[in-house]
Amino acid sequence: MWLEQSKDIAAALADPARLVPNGINNKRDRFDVYRNNVAGSLTCALGETFPVVKRLVGDDFFSAMAGVYVRDNMPASPLLFEYGATFADFIDGFEPAGELPYLSDVARLERLWLDAYHAADAVPLKIDALAAIAEDELDDLTLTLHPAAFLFRSAYPVLSIWQAHQRADAPDLSALSWQPERMLIVRPALDVALVRLDAAAYAFVAGLAAGQSLGNVCGSLVDIADVDPPVHLAQLFQAGAVQALDRSCI
Amino acid sequence: MLERLRADYPLSVHGVGLSIGGALPLDAAHLQRLQTVVDRYQPALVSEHLAWSTHQSGFLNDLLAMPYSNETLGIAARHIDQVQTALGRVIALENPSTYVTFSNSRWDEVDFIAELQRRTGCGLLLDVNNVYVSAVNHGWDAVDYIARFPLAHVREIHLAGHAPAADAGGGFLIDAHDRAVADDVMSLFAAVIARTGPLPSLIEWDNDLPDWPELMAEVDRISGVLRSHADMDGLSHVA
């Protein structure tokens, strides 16, 4: 009986248009406290996970947009830091936000930032580890990215937009160059860092992240301008984004 | 950071997501996560709420009120047993703040909690502000609630500020955690400590946080009450 009763309550909490379920001594609108708590706390949680999206559209617009999302996408887990995995896709289909085509990619970046923040800890490998690899083994070398390292690229300058919103004062986007941007999101120790990658570095790191050997990655990038494997590798190690080297395929 | 703190201070792990009062089976993955935290940090106390938050539709992210019936008594007791068995330790159950009651409730809240304690051997966490908020909202007598509460099993006290609100049904209180503890709640707290002796006491202030001096002044008020009964030997003075 409690199973059925709580099912009715859950449905009424998610949908304000539903009547207050039978069995509840509802002093007029008192059940609305729970409705407000559920919708309000989840909207607030989304605002904390997507602060730049919130600043870009303003508090009122964000609350309205998040409210629509919350109604149809209750969290599957009590771990609220995981909530909003589909928020960026939702924004893509949310017509009132259509004027800001980059908004969903900003949301994707913020989601990855939080994923990196909560990913497993690991001590990043130092670049000295490469010295132990014989030169003739380098071609077959593969590497494992740090568990808190993610790659992202956008058709919009979302890294620049994100960076412009990290200060309290009003961001100036007028000087922004509306070019695609690529980045590495990584948390080698306590703090999440966003590292800008150029097209060549992104292609190089993406190949390694996909499990390709160093030799294969270099071979597949010969036609791309500005490819400089030693520089890209150094940048990757410098960022603390490498967990392990693997020679097992030799 | 928790490991560093744990080296110098006992920790109290306070859960909000297990849905002890929910009709569905406990979330096994969530319980496993709690077990990992407890194994790693060996807290002095683990607590959860007499409330529910999870249904098939998902996690509702609020501590929802439940009817107090024989059926829900059995469900909550089974869930507390399950958690205590999994963790290999006694947990403390917190009394809720509520805004509605249920026509199918057959138990008074204090009797329900006391019976749960008796069946499961669990400890209790007494949130004095929750007592006050629920008493105002439902026309209960907070002093009588405290007088009947099984204080001998209380392991920790919670205090918080509440926000006055009003709707078409009249005035009521919201458990807002956004301001100083009300004087009436402080009086109830002093009455509890006078009976139990000093207990670990926590101020829940997680919205609209004030500046540090104001927060410390609040801690001083609580400490003053605890110090004035410091000569008491803990729970042995419970009547």
Image (spheres, rainbow, N blue to C red):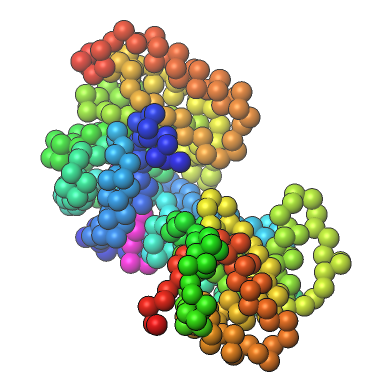
- Tell me the quarter of the picture where residue A65 sits: bottom right
Instruction: Indicate the position of residue B102 as horizontal and vertical percent values.
Output: 31, 48
Which residue occupies the foreground of this view, A158 or B110?
A158
With A106 as the anchor, is B91 left or right in this view?
Answer: left
Examine the rendered structure and indicate whether residue B202 appears above or below residue B228: below
- Tell me the quarter of the picture where residue B133 sits: top left
Q: Residue at x 28, y 10 (%)?
A: B232
Instruction: Indicate the position of residue B30 as horizontal and vertical percent values.
Output: 31, 56
Which residue occupies the foreground of this view, B64 or B88?
B88
Q: Residue at x 18, y 44 (%)?
A: B88
Examine the rendered structure and indicate whether residue B96 appears above or below residue B224: below
Res. A201 in view = yes
Which residue occupies the foreground of this view, B79 or A206?
A206
Q: Is residue A162 magenta?
A: no
Res. A24 in view = no
Q: Residue at x 73, y 81 (%)?
A: A226
Farthest residue to the right: give it.
A175
Q: Residue at x 61, y 31 (%)?
A: B210
Q: Is residue B51 magenta?
A: yes
With A166 as the anchor, is A24 left or right in this view?
Answer: left
Instruction: Indicate the position of residue A219 as horizontal and vertical percent values.
Output: 59, 89
Q: Which residues are magenta?
A: B50-57
User: If the image is split into quadrants, where does the C terminus of chain A sit?
Assistant: bottom left
